[in-house]
Image (cartoon, helix red, strand yellow):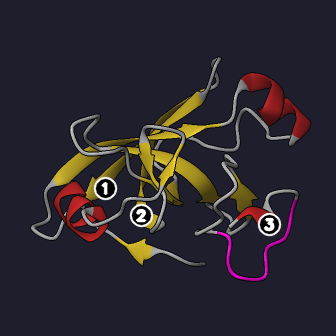
Amino acid sequence: MGGNHIPGFQEAYANAEKDNNTVGSSVRARVGVTLKGTVVRFERVNPHSFLYIDVKDKDGDTQLWTIEGPNVTQLSRMAFRIDALKAGDAVEACGYLPKEGRYRHYLTGELLTLPDGRKEKWLDYGHHKCLGPDYQDQHSGQR
């Protein structure tokens, strides 16, 4: 998986600070950021689902992060079970940070590694920094 493993938001913002390439108008997309944490809750709502995870920073302090995900219809099309994410499950999310001044502890998720090790493409804005160099889809020629 591409991206940088980032234990907390200070390090995440430091690594993405020089990023000028964006997804839409609110997300930094040059570097995929990876967070490892424990599920607090998962909300299947529209227009996007939200996964809340506790992430320990380099000092051992826990930070609550929000991972933006697919909407309810997209989750259904993915056959993503409602019980696939339970409180206490260990997960890994790779995605993009918001531009500075937006939200803290927020990641637009592109790839989610589930507790059983399966990897799910989460949201797709076409940059694929978390999906690896061999990943191909309708956006692949637009880099």
Tag of residue 140: 3
Give the percent coordinates (x, y) of residue 51: 51, 38
Q: Which residue is mark 2?
A: 36
Q: Quadrant of the N terminus?
A: bottom right
Above or below — where is 14 with respect to 44?
Answer: below
Q: CA distance from mark 2 to mark 1?
A: 6 Å
Residue 134 in magenta?
A: yes
- Amino acid on which disc 3 is placed: Ser
Q: CA distance from mark 1 to mark 3?
A: 31 Å
Residue under the image location 70 percent in, 49 percent down: 124
Circle 1 SS class: strand
- Amino acid on which disc 1 is placed: Val
Mark 1 Cα shell of 10 Å, populated few (<14), some (14-19), many (≥20) = many
The residue range painted magenta reads 131-137
On the question of residue 103 being in view, the answer is: yes
Query: Depth check: 16 or 75 in front?
Result: 16
Circle 3 SS class: helix
Image side of residue 34 versus residue 59, left or right: right
Question: Of helix, strand and loop, which mostly describes the magenta segment?
Answer: loop
Residue 75 in magenta?
A: no
Mark 3 Cα shell of 10 Å, populated few (<14), some (14-19), many (≥20) = few
Mark 2 Cα shell of 10 Å, populated few (<14), some (14-19), many (≥20) = some
Q: Are marks 2 and 1 in contact (CB under 8 Å)?
A: yes
Tag of residue 55: 1
Above or below — where is 127 with respect to 76?
Answer: below
Above or below — where is 94 with respect to 54?
Answer: below
Above or below — where is 47 with respect to 15?
Answer: above
Give the percent coordinates (x, y) of residue 132: 67, 78
Disc on the earlier residue, 2 or 3: 2
Circle 2 SS class: strand
Q: Quadrant of residue 55?
A: bottom left
